[in-house]
Image (spheres, rainbow, N blue to C red):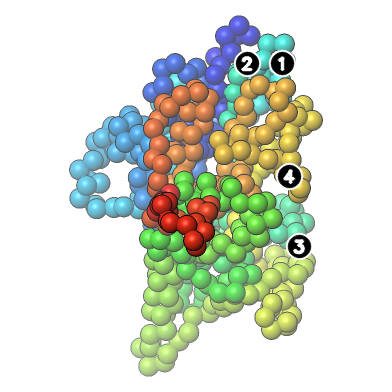
Amino acid sequence: MTNTPTQPLDLLGIGIGPFNLSLAALADTTSHLHTAFYDQRPTFHWHPGILIEGTTLQVPFLADLVTLVDPTSPWSFLAYLKNHNRLFPFYFAERFHIPRTEYDAYCRWVAESLPHCHFNHQIDAVRWNPEHAYFEIDFTQLDLDGQAKALGRTYTRNIAIGIGTAPYVPEPLRPLADAPTVPVLHSADYLHHREHLLTTPHITIVGTGQSGAEIFLDLLRHRPPGHEGITWIGRTPAFAPMEYSKLGLEHFTPDYTRYFHALPEPVRDHLLPQQWQLHKGIDHNTINAIHEELYQRTLTTEAGESNWPDVTLTPGVSVRTAGRMGTNRVELHLEHTQQGTQSRLTTNAIILATGYRQRPIEPLLAPLDPYLRRDSAGRPRIDNQHRLILDPSIQGAIHVQNAELHTHGIGTPDLGLGAWRSAVILNSIAGETIYPLPERTAFTTFGLHTPTPRTPPHAPNTSTVPLPHG
């Protein structure tokens, strides 16, 4: 597993989430590239705390690890189904969006089958060796309990960092979330605490995106009518549906990624917050299911009374401060943005469906910090090949996966672009086209091409204006 200085790897992947797993799967069928992928976890798991029964991926199954680049790959989702004798059931199920639990199982099958994926390996340091023109990687091999088992070092010409994201906890709630006995948890841990939450008198969900909606619906379905005891709040001005029109989805194409990357930095920074509904709204089916469940609970009872469920849904609300009350209650100080009003809410448990943030790559690359080129906000600059822009003295490449939102836009965390980005990285490392990629992927032309100079009015017009494309 450890490579010698005279035979360095062509590529070492740090982290084995869906994106680096896609890179590993596509590299597996590329015989002349020598690769390895390390992850400190004992096995692959994709957001296990929110694999709620009945929830599906928000992208079609074609957005697996490889299909949109290589449909013939042995690591496609359809190949997984065939391997498990489930092609015909899937065929008759007529599913385009698969259960999240099935996607998790598919990725785990790939990760356990690829010989160059190594779990229980913690990366400790990354250095550049200028004499031999390769990176030196120090790692610790862990035992099944996560304790240090052995130290090692390997060498590689190129790196792909895919260390993923971490649950985000808003500042006012961090002290409570860090306290072990306070009932404040992130949605990433929801299923681990669901049985206890179902017996809790009152629950507050903070966050009006897809995770918040799925948890609200799951709790609602498992709590008795008239005794739901759920409050759902969030900062967005509405419980808004995710943009899912066909042309809207073209923002998740390579065409838009290239367009966004070419924009000036201030324009990119201004544009990103405005696009929240493209990727932070709620799936239409989930919204409809919530409304249907709420409506059913208003139906008249045997006594002829009409009931309303004991729930409160309020958008446009932010949490100003929070404090503990006794052993099992929390008080939230709330502010309504549009009204300018403030209020207090006492609850027994808080679920933070507040999303995730990119894990910083700087601690991992501390020895290389002087070589990193940064933008005006101090963020790493990243080129159109998903490479960190480094000092020219560093001849190797460091590619990043899901760490380039500020340079490549909202498609960065989208599973549908994972295989395409992996192919871009492999083509770049190999210096040749291993995986041919389409020049055009969207009907939308996102920017104006440089116009052809106008012919003076007195001169005959002998030029032609090209049609916009790509």
Would residue 432 be found to the left or right of residue 62 on screen?
right
Q: Amino acid at mark 3?
A: Pro
**Residue 291 disc label:** none
Dot in front, 2 or 3: 2
Binning the other alpha carbons within 10 Å of mark 4 as few (below 14), some (14 to 19) or many (20 upward) gives few
Q: Which residue is mark 1?
A: 129
User: Looking at this view, is 181 or 120 the one in front?
Assistant: 120
Residue 246: image x %, image y %?
38, 60
**Residue 155 disc label:** 2
Mark 2 and mark 1: span between their CA atoms? 9 Å
Q: Amino acid at mark 1?
A: Asn
Task: Name, please, the residue furthest toward the right.
Answer: 370
Mark 1 and mark 4: span between their CA atoms? 26 Å
Disc with the residue nearer the chain's start (2 vs 4): 2
Disc with the residue nearer the chain's start (1 vs 4): 1
Disc with the residue nearer the chain's start (1 vs 3): 1
Disc with the residue nearer the chain's start (2 vs 1): 1
Q: Answer yes or no: do the residues labelled 2 and 4 have beta carbons within 8 Å?
A: no
Q: Which residue is mark 3?
A: 172
